[in-house]
Image (cartoon, grey):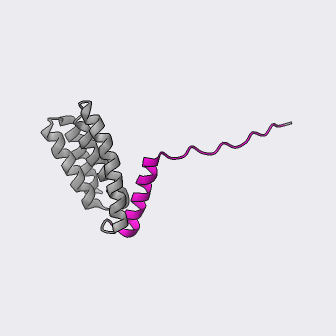
């Protein structure tokens, strides 16, 4: 006799991933100027900034750079190429100011790949 085991429900997405998915969908359907989208973007930004300040307090200037990269990917996933490039260029400037040459090169490679697409 084959024993049946109950199915295990899938692990829920972390709340920040759910917010990100909501935000990408809202950007795609309503655009960045919609008040609801602005509110979601503000909420996402505040949550991400809280993480950045925590990391920065432990001595990581890279955290601010990564926030701009995350924001760029969010815009890119929603189809807003120009907004993505602006955030990546900000991240590149931050990396350059911090003299993080390898990170600057990685960001510029990302910029080039978007522009070439």
Residue at 21% x, 40% y is 105
- Of 110 and 77, nearer the camera is 77
Residue at 15% x, 36% y is 98
| Badge count | 0
Residue at 17% x, 36% y is 101
Left-right relation of 3 to 45: right
Residue extending furthest right? Answer: 1
Q: Examine the rendered structure and indicate whether residue 29 appears above or below residue 89.
A: below
Q: Is residue 25 magenta?
A: yes
Spot occupied by residue 76 in the image (x, y as percentages of width and height): 33, 56
**Quadrant location of the N terminus?**
top right
Residue extending furthest top? Answer: 58
Q: Is residue 16 magenta?
A: yes
Q: Picture quarter containing residue 32?
A: bottom left
**Quadrant location of the C terminus?**
bottom left
Spot occupied by residue 67 in the image (x, y as percentages of width and height): 28, 45
Q: Picture quarter containing residue 24?
A: bottom left
Spot occupied by residue 38 in the image (x, y as percentages of width and height): 32, 62
- Of 97 and 33, nearer the camera is 33
Magenta-drawn segment: 2-31
């Amino acid at each position: 006799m084959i024993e049946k085991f109950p199915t295990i429900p899938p692990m829920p997405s972390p709340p920040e991933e759910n917010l990100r998915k909501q935000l990408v969908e809202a950007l795609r359907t309503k655009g960045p100027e919609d008040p609801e989208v602005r509110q979601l973007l503000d909420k996402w930004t505040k949550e991400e900034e809280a993480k950045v300040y925590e990391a920065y307090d432990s001595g990581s200037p890279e955290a601010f750079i990564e926030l701009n990269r995350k924001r760029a990917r969010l815009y890119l996933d929603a189809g807003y190429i120009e907004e993505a490039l602006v955030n990546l260029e900000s991240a590149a400037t931050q990396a350059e100011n911090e003299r993080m040459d390898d990170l600057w090169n990685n960001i510029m490679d990302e910029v080039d790949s978007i522009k070439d697409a």
